[in-house]
Image: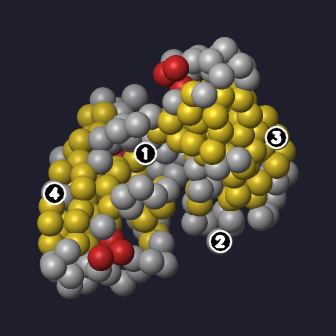
Amino acid sequence: EMQLLESGGGVVQPGGSLRLSCAASGVTFSSYAMSWVRQAPGKGLEWVSGIGGSGGNIKYADSVKGRFTISRDNSKNTLHLQMNSLGVEDTAIYYCVTGITMKDWGQGTLVTVSS
Amino acid sequence: DVVMTQSPLSLPVTLGQPASISCKSSQGLVYSDGSTYLNWFQQRPGQSPRRLIYKVSNRDSGVPDRFSGSGSGTDFTLEISRVEAEDVGIYYCMQATHWPPTFGQGTKVEIK
């Protein structure tokens, strides 16, 4: 089982940027595709972006394409999400999860976009 | 995108009684490898989601056997044989057969 710990959330003004990180442990990180899933306050779950184990096969939801960039550093067992041009609709808890099967979840990090 | 439709959205249940949640997909969920990538997640209040069931009917490690998943094609069901207090929360179905992965709206299970 993979343990996942997100960080980097906070309050940012509309149009601003944030970089989320997810530290993984417990398994061979590079063997696993990873994804980001978000949950707006009181709402359901939305897949945001995914990346293959070696860093390829990158995909984005239409709602974030061109604004968010997913990456990973397998030497540091870390997943990242660079978020630019943030809007109020991006306010959510962001979860780091294993691949698209989503077996393992982190505790999430809250991103609040507000003026 | 594949639309996942859950019902009911709210499910009050008496302790010890069964509960059933339906999930219908707008397209069939059989992948080219023959597998059906339909998962169920539980989100207890204030917690991260937790996967309960993968590929329709396979329970994850540590999931009580009162939880079971079934279905095929476009119609899927999560059943709880006897609801316990710890089962309170929101349940989501999710498909990972077609890109992008999509979730149902969630079903809130509460105790009557």
Q: Chain of mark 3?
A: B
User: Position of A14 compared to A3: left or right?
Assistant: left
Label 4: how many Cα within 10 Å (few below 14, some 14–19, many 20+): some
Give the mark nearest the N terminus, 4 or 1: 4
At horizontal 39% and vertical 76% (from top left) the residue drawn is A64
Pointers 1 and 3 within a single chain = no
Give the mark nearest the N terminus, 2 or 3: 2
Task: Please name the residue that numbered disc 3 is placed on.
Answer: B71
**Distance between mark 2 and mark 3 Cα atoms:** 21 Å
Label 2: how many Cα within 10 Å (few below 14, some 14–19, many 20+): few
**Residue B53: in sight, yes or no?**
no
The numbered disc on residue B78 is none
Q: Secondary structure at mark 1?
A: strand
Residue A81 drawn at (x, y percent):
27, 64
Task: Please name the residue that numbered disc 1 is placed on.
Answer: A98
At horizontal 15% and vertical 72% (from top left) the residue drawn is A12
Q: Secondary structure at mark 3?
A: strand
**Distance between mark 4 and mark 2 Cα atoms:** 30 Å
Q: Chain of mark 1?
A: A
Q: Nearer the viewer, mark 1 or mark 2?
A: 2
Q: Chain of mark 2?
A: B
Question: Answer yes or no: do the residues labelled 4 and 1 have beta carbons within 8 Å?
Answer: no
User: Position of B86 compared to A27: left or right?
Assistant: right
Residue B105 drawn at (x, y percent):
59, 56
Pointers 1 and 2 within a single chain = no
Task: Please name the residue that numbered disc 4 is placed on.
Answer: A8
At horizontal 65% and vertical 28% (from top left) the residue drawn is B13
Q: Is residue B20 above or below residue A57?
A: above
